């Protein structure tokens, strides 16, 4: 009987250790998910705030540039036309470089998520 009791005690200990390991792993995963979600939300929030302010500034600069060019050329509409074409060219360049932008974003996120 002593051998069976020893095997039973050993298996109970192994079960307890396995359950503790599972619980600790689950806690770690919860903490890791919380870290990643909070990092992502923080990054998106900062990007939205900074992006909104930059966008408003860009609009004012575009109007000022269009008016200035219009006065230089003698027609305000030509200034607006030139600024509009500049924005289209910048948009085309960004569109052509979209894969490079995606690669940079993925690299930065990959480093943050898989650094452990």
Image: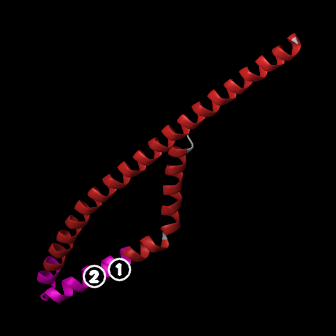
The residue where tag 1 is placed is 88
Residue in the foreground of this view, choosing between 36 and 56: 36
Q: Is residue 22 above or below residue 100?
A: above
SS at mark 1 in the image: helix
Neighbours of disc 2 within 10 Å: few (<14), some (14-19), many (20+): some
Q: Residue at x 17, y 70 (%)?
A: 60
**Residue 87 percent across, percent down from the top left:** 31, 77
**Residue 82 percent across, percent down from the top left:** 26, 83
- 70 left or right, relative to 103: left
Quarter of the image where one finds residue 24: top right
Region of the chain picked out in magenta, as a range: 68-90
- 45 left or right, relative to 113: left
**Residue 99 percent across, percent down from the top left:** 53, 66
The residue where tag 2 is placed is 84
Point out the residue furthest to the front here: 1
SS at mark 2 in the image: helix
Asked which colour scheme the image uses, the reply is: secondary structure
Q: Is residue 76 above or below residue 105?
A: below
- 23 left or right, relative to 50: right
Determine if the magenta segment contains residue 79.
yes
Q: Residue at x 21, y 71 (%)?
A: 59
Mark 1 touching mark 2, by CB under 8 A? yes
Q: Residue at x 21, y 73 (%)?
A: 62
Q: Is residue 2 above or below residue 33?
A: above
Q: Quadrant of the N terminus?
A: top right
Q: Mark number for residue 72?
A: none
Residue in the foreground of this view, choosing between 10 and 4: 4
Q: CA distance from mark 1 to mark 2?
A: 6 Å
Q: Residue at x 20, y 87 (%)?
A: 78
Q: Quadrant of the C terminus?
A: top right
Neighbours of disc 1 within 10 Å: few (<14), some (14-19), many (20+): few
């Amino acid at each position: 009987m002593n051998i069976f009791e020893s095997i039973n005690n050993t298996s109970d200990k192994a079960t307890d250790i396995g359950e503790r390991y599972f619980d600790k792993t689950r806690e770690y995963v919860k903490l890791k998910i919380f870290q990643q979600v909070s990092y992502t939300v923080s990054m998106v929030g900062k990007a939205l705030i900074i992006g909104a302010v930059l966008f408003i500034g860009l609009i004012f600069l575009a109007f000022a540039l269009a008016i200035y060019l219009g006065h230089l050329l003698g027609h305000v509409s030509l200034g607006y036309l030139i600024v509009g074409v500049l924005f289209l060219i910048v948009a085309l360049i960004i569109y052509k470089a979209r894969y490079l932008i995606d690669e940079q974003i993925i690299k930065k996120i990959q480093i943050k998520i898989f650094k452990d």
